[in-house]
Image (spheres, rainbow, N blue to C red):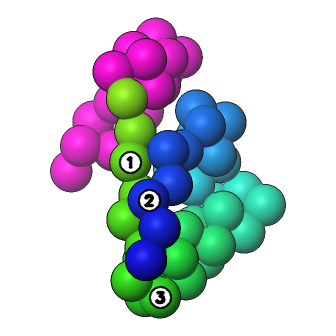
Amino acid sequence: MATYLLDTSVIIDALNGKRGRRDLLLGLVRQGHLLACCPINVTEVYAGMRSNEEVSIIT
């Protein structure tokens, strides 16, 4: 089992359903791998969101 520190671009693609990132990440989790992010990822994702997107991601 490995731990993957995700790049912000991968997180954003997964949230937006682009480039098959969601399936890739789900596949890694199903294989028993851990996915990680850091405070910088969180800051970059929130900084790039529009106000209406924030609600749809949280709920």
Callout 3 secondary element: loop
Q: Which residue is mark 2?
A: 3
Q: Is residue 3 visible?
A: yes
Q: Are marks 1 and 2 in contact (CB under 8 Å)?
A: yes
Q: Which residue is mark 1?
A: 36
Q: Is residue 26 left or right of residue 59?
A: right
Which mark is on residue 6?
none
33 up-or-down from 21: above or below: below
Point out residue 49 in the picture as x, y percentages from the top left corner.
48, 21
Instruction: Kindly report the distance in space between the C-alpha atoms of the residues bearing marks 1 and 2.
Output: 7 Å
Mark 2 is on which residue type? Thr
Instruction: Kindly report the distance in space between the C-alpha atoms of the residues bearing marks 3 and 2.
Output: 11 Å
Comes first in the chain, label 3 or label 2: 2
Q: Which residue is mark 3?
A: 31
Mark 1 is on which residue type? Ala
17 up-or-down from 53: above or below: below
Quarter placement of the N terminus: bottom left
Comes first in the chain, label 1 or label 3: 3
Whether 42 is among the magenta residues is yes
Mark 3 is on which residue type? Gln
Instruction: Kindly report the distance in space between the C-alpha atoms of the residues bearing marks 1 and 3.
Output: 15 Å
